[in-house]
Amino acid sequence: MTFDDQDYLLRYPMIERVLISSEDITRRIRQLGNEISRDYQGSTPIFVCILKGAYPFLADLTRCVSVEHEVDFMAVSSYDGGVQSTGVVKIEKDLKANITDRDVVLVEDIIDTGLTISYLVDMLQTRNPRSIRVASLLDKKAARKKEVPLHYVGFEIPKEFVIGYGLDYDEKFRNLPFIGIMKA
Ligand code: IMP
């Protein structure tokens, strides 16, 4: 844990503990960036950030990607401010780019039930991209209701509600540099 992580812990007493430190996140994202750069040699992939939660991951990941690429953004809502999945996915903001014949990398913060990402993959497949792969910082495998192929995963985590590094509770705590667990 860095000094910065400890400083945040002191300032946010509602956080119980750090699950993944900012140093570990940085190290793992560098590895994922290298892997993606190798896999997409000769292509110009388009990284699609799923807002809001994936914005820090997109920013850090793409800075570790050495192949030429583009970024675009989609906003979806699947949770209604709380901690339970509703299973309903609403597209709040669609892509600007045309993804037909493009290599697409969907960038997610966390795959929980899998409902959101499987809906998105199916929806984007209808636009005839050359390929779609999913990069998710976190994978809560034990919570899965729908199987989805994940190509790039940062960390597998237990079935606990986490906050930080883009992930929110009631729109707060996205700014934390680490992944943390809140006090019950
Ligand atoms: P899924 O459809 O259940 O896979 O949920 C995906 C979305 O739910 C993520 O993109 C997050 O926005 C949100 N989510 C799932 N688990 C957590 C969590 O532990 N903390 C914060 N948000 C979460």
Image (cartoon, helix red, strand yellow):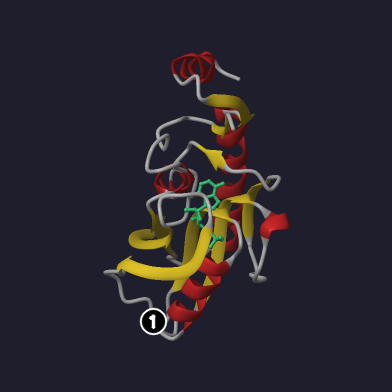
Secondary structure state at the residue bearing disc 1: loop
47 shown above or below 66: below
Q: Which image quarter: residue 71? A: bottom left
Q: Nearer the viewer, residue 87 or 65?
A: 87
Circle 1: residue type: Thr
76 shown above or below 4: below
Residue 137 placement, left or right of 81: right
Q: Is residue 116 visible?
A: yes
Q: Is mark 1 within 8 Å of ligand 1?
A: no
Q: Nearer the viewer, residue 178 or 38?
A: 178
Q: Which image quarter: residue 150? A: bottom right
Q: How many marks?
A: 1
Residue that appears at 33% across and 60% down: 73
> Which quadrant: the N terminus?
top right
Q: Is residue 42 visible?
A: no
23 shown above or below 116: above
Residue that appears at 58% across and 27% down: 23
Counting from the top left corner in percent of width and height, residue 137 is at 57, 48
Residue 147 placement, left or right of 25: right
Residue that appears at 44% across and 86% down: 126
Counting from the top left corner in percent of width and height, residue 151 is at 63, 62
For mark 1, does the 10 Å Cα neighbourhood hold few (<14), some (14 to 19), or many (20 or more) residues?
some
Counting from the top left corner in percent of width and height, residue 154 is at 62, 47
Residue hosting label 1? 100
Q: Nearer the viewer, residue 66 or 86?
A: 86
Residue that appears at 38% across and 63% down: 76
Q: Residue furthest front?
A: 184
> Which quadrant: the C terminus?
top right
Counting from the top left corner in percent of width and height, residue 65 is at 49, 49
